[in-house]
Amino acid sequence: DQQVKQNSPSLSVQEGRISILNCDYTNSMFDYFLWYKKYPAEGPTFLISISSIKDKNEDGRFTVFLNKSAKHLSLHIVPSQPGDSAVYFCAASLHNDMRFGAGTRLTVKP
Amino acid sequence: EAQVTQNPRYLITVTGKKLTVTCSQNMNHEYMSWYRQDPGLGLRQIYYSMNVEVTDKGDVPEGYKVSRKEKRNFPLILESPSPNQTSLYFCASSWLGANGYTFGSGTRLTVV
């Protein structure tokens, strides 16, 4: 029973355009949400997070939006760059208990 | 440099031959955890530990053991590996109650 779902296994966008990665969760008790980025042959690295008391968090080109009523969050990357090509994992957390989605492979084409 | 170190990075073994994957962190984190990554399933938690001598099962603990005798080390033990344990394994650590992990670089295990 996956509590965190990323329904798009892959996404391809053109350099300079916006990338939107989506994530849904089922457990309303989660109080913190994170996005991790993973390159081949490396471990996931933290990208951006958002507390459940907020609906938006921005860090440079990356913005995470949280819609608690819909149990949905999204990651926007603007503008997308070829170096953003990686697998992105959505995660939902309650204290140290963290659940991950299956990941979305983003390809940014030059 | 703050990091989580896993060894080995790659391992091919045969069914039934006991193996250990080591994990060490230098950040004095209380919390450590093991995950496996499989296509279409994302990262699934195997075992976790909230402190020395405190370990508990995650979502997919069958066929695995762990120990936490020291704060910095959290080895993953496969007593009798089987082909369905072929996977990419990640160790992670954090402060207790923190919202976010530091991951190791991964161990790709193949059981034939």
Image (cartoon, coloured by chain):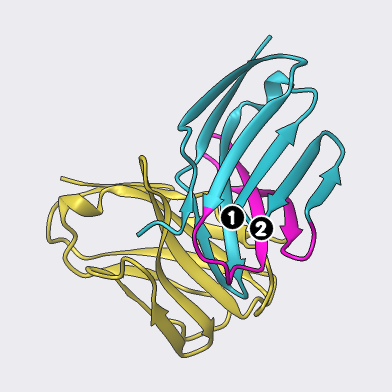
Q: Is mark 2 on a helix, strand or loop?
A: loop
Query: Mark number for residue A68?
Result: 2
Query: Residue B32, image x and y in percent?
Result: 54, 72
The one nearer the camera, B50 or A15, is A15
> Chain coloured cyan: which letter?
A
Residue B72 in view: no
Q: For this view, does B36 lie left or right of residue A28?
A: left
Seen from the viewer's position, the closer of residues B110 and A85 is A85
State how far apart marks 2 and 1 are (Cα). 5 Å
Q: Mark 1 packing: few (<14 Cα in 10 Å), some, or many (20+)? A: some
Location of the C terminus of chain B (image quadrant): top left
Q: Residue at x 69, y 9 (%)?
A: A110
In-front residue for pair B3/B54: B54
**Looking at the picture, which amino acid does disc 2 mark?**
Lys
Asked if A55 appears above or below A58 in the picture, the reply is below
Q: Which amino acid does label 1 sit on?
A: Lys
In this view, the residue farthest toward the right is A60
Q: Position of residue B48 (x, y in %)?
A: 46, 75
Which residue is at a point 26% across and 48% down the rendered structure image? B86
The residue at which mark 1 appears reads as A71
- Residue at position x 74%, y 45% in the image: A64
State which region is magenta. A25-54
Q: Chain B is drawn in which colour?
A: yellow
Q: Residue B60 carries which label?
A: none
